[in-house]
Image: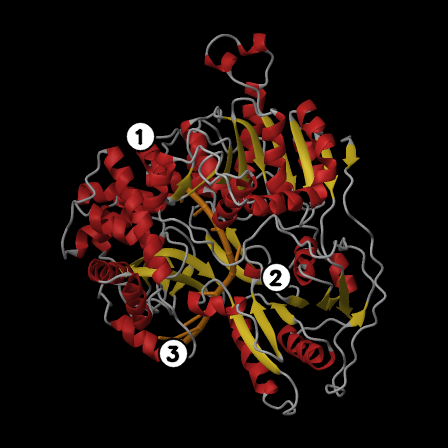
Amino acid sequence: MAKIAALKGVSRSHKISDSGPHSKRLKKRERPWVDVSDDELHVKRAKKGTGDRSKNLNGSPSKPSALESKKKAKIGHPSRHLANGTKQASIQEQRRELPITSGKDALLDEIRDNDVTILIGETGSGKTTQVPQYILESGISGKGMIAVTQPRKVAATSLATRVATEQNTSVGGLVGYSVRFDEASSEDTRIKYVTDGMLVRELLGDTLLSRYSVVIVDEAHERTLRTDLLLTNLKSIQKTRNAPADAKGKGSVAKLNPLKIVIMSATLDAEKFSKFYDNAKVIYVKGRQHPVTIYHTAISQPDFVDAAMRTFFQIHTDQPPGDVLIFLPGQEDIESLDKSIKLYADRLPKDSSGIVVCPMYAALPPGQQAKIFSPAPQNTRKCILATNIAETSITIPGIKYVIDTGKCKEKRYIARDSGTGFDTLLTKDITKSSAMQRAGRAGRESIGFCFRLYTEESFKALPDSAEPEIRRCALSSSLLQLKCLGQDLEQLDFMDKPDWEAIASALKTLYLLGAIDNQKHLTKLGRDMAVLPLEPHLARAVVASQECGCTLEIIDIVSVLSASSKLFFDSTDEREAAAEARRKFRHSSGDHMTILNVVRSYQEIVASENKSGRKEWCKKQFLNDRCLSEARDIRDQLREVCVRMGVDWRSSCGDDEQPVLRSLVRGLVQQAAFLQPDGSYKQLMGPSIVKIHPSSSLCDKKVPAIIYDELVYTSHIYARGVSSVPRKLIAEVSVFKNKNIG
DNA sequence: GAGCACTGC
């Protein structure tokens, strides 16, 4: 059994006595919610005027470009700057008032005495900013560095900046960060905030993470695929590094410092983490939140969009000022609710206060996203319609009311032995921890209210936390990385083991790409592919481009395909104009060459225009500037890797699309389909009938053979990112030589 | 003819 210790913190349990608001104007319709006292949300009253300052994820802090940051990394800022004395004093005062401060000594004792410590801290406890500083100041980390992992880049960079300020230094000195395309660190860096993916990458070059004496895994409850890979590897690294001196034998291992691991999490999964690390000690620290009153509905609400609208107007007409945040599963529901609210708002009496509706989802152009951060005009209530993006990634100020539909979209990989699995993206119920997180969004600045559009019974029936990514993602990329570490996915000690089907599917994919042989051993080709920061199928295309003489083109295309945002905007209102703009870039062979046309045009604009000119051009073409500039970062990184690998990234095939398609086919062997007599497409290596996605330039076209970037199951199995390829090109790929295709 | 949560190297 794990020992459990509780730290003192500012906490006071809160009884909910508030009676619910009454419906006046919407009398005819039943109130969708009832008052329910609720203690599953640990509501804490904060001292006046002190909010959660440990994380500032609001907006995007101006980040240096990759180039600038490299400079910074080189120069470093080792000296302590004499900042404004009073400002520094107030920063130190804020630090002292954080809930975690009172438990500092007890916490350090635990960390000193144990190899692994599990720290469960609620929002606002200050654990993420303070614990690394405590460890540094206590000397526990010795000469090694302290790594703090984060699932998101913006968190890693902004936390580092905050902690550097608390240490009265500039970021990149004592406190630094390292995320993809952006690094601020120097020889003096002792605390480094990194993305979990970055540390996994670092493992490939330093399998024992020997530069670090302490690794803190933050937000462990999110259980990203990369966090899970780290949790597994840290466990074995610690076994090696902390073994008794005589067991280590002679050589480099004997000289290694022991490794301390701190797992920080926000949920009740403590036991599970503890069990995984041989019953490691669990420590709890209270958070700081304003009380949130939670209401559930009396009966379930099948039409959650309509229920959300009714609830919003009840709040709007009956409740004091304060902005409303509504959680919805996706863009489609957001757009529909947006329309309904606007329609209904027009029918309100003239003397009622105004409403501003702000949609918020990842695919929204940045200009419209920014709207949610500007305060509503006088006598106006802001209503934000958001996806999960507002649950963890961004914090919106001014929210007093949360309406929670209880739904989200979840991506899940359906594995197949043939390796031709596909993603589903379906609406499903959220989890308890997600519901608590959503409710908590109402209590950031003062007391808040959360209206759940589901019954209390439904809430109780929800799973505690989401299934970890490792159980619902494609694993080919991770499998390849692990192969490089000499590890086998099948045998590793994971907190949650991946499905056998998912492993089989990933093995098949890597085998067909030539990354492993029929003995499951890593090949030279596989090692080259792993060096490229790309999904294996795209990495294979880059390697193939070398022989095809079109590395320049393939890197341009692959960079856009692996950027995190979409290339084309497609807003409902201006669909026609967007389609018209897109036609200019269209290439007869399909989407991949179309992307290349866009990139080429963009590069001309980059050469002749400044940043605002670029943005203007993108807007006019309905192109996503963010995607294109991210693609440029990826392109530069890929070119660098090519130089290291001795590949000439300049080799170009000009306007001939054949070499480009040939390289792509190498990577997309499993992602090919042939036209059937009835006009449908059937997977070449799998059993599915697929449709060309409506967003594709080849939608409606009947071509004999296609390759595609991905399959996604929504209302049908759709192929996205589609190109028409001559059958003989597919037949050329060695895997098919015996199959008599062509 | 029809649509797309989030993140990472």
Question: Mark 2 = which residue?
Answer: A428
Point out residue A152 in the picture as x, y percentages from the top left corner.
Answer: 51, 48
> Which mark identifies residue A524?
1
> Which mark identifies residue A23?
none
Dividing the picture into quadrants, the one containing residue A600 is: bottom left
The answer to whether one can see residue A626 in this image is: yes
Q: Disc 2 and disc 1: Cα gap in Å?
A: 42 Å
Q: Secondary structure at mark 2?
A: strand
- Asked if the residue at tag 2 contacts the one at tag 3, i.e. Cβ–Cβ closer than 8 Å, the answer is no
Label 1 neighbour load within 10 Å: few <14, some 14-19, many 20+: few
Q: Chain of mark 1?
A: A
Relative to A662, is A278 above or below? Answer: above
Q: Does label 3 or label 2 sit earlier along the sequence?
A: 2
**Which residue is at a point 13% across and 54% down the rendered structure image?**
A654
- Asked if the residue at tag 1 contacts the one at tag 2, i.e. Cβ–Cβ closer than 8 Å, the answer is no
Dividing the picture into quadrants, the one containing residue A721 is: bottom left
The answer to whether one can see residue A738 in this image is: no
Q: Which one is nearer the viewer's eye here, A703 or A33?
A: A33
Q: Disc 3 and disc 2: Cα gap in Å?
A: 30 Å
Q: Amino acid at mark 1?
A: Lys
Q: Are marks 2 and 1 on the same chain?
A: yes
**Which residue is at a point 29% across and 38% down the rendered structure image?**
A641
Relative to A274, is A69 above or below? Answer: below
Relative to A545, is A655 above or below? Answer: below
Q: Amino acid at mark 2?
A: Lys
Image position of A253 (left or right of A494): left
Q: Disc 1 and disc 3: Cα gap in Å?
A: 49 Å
Question: Mark 3 = which residue?
Answer: A574
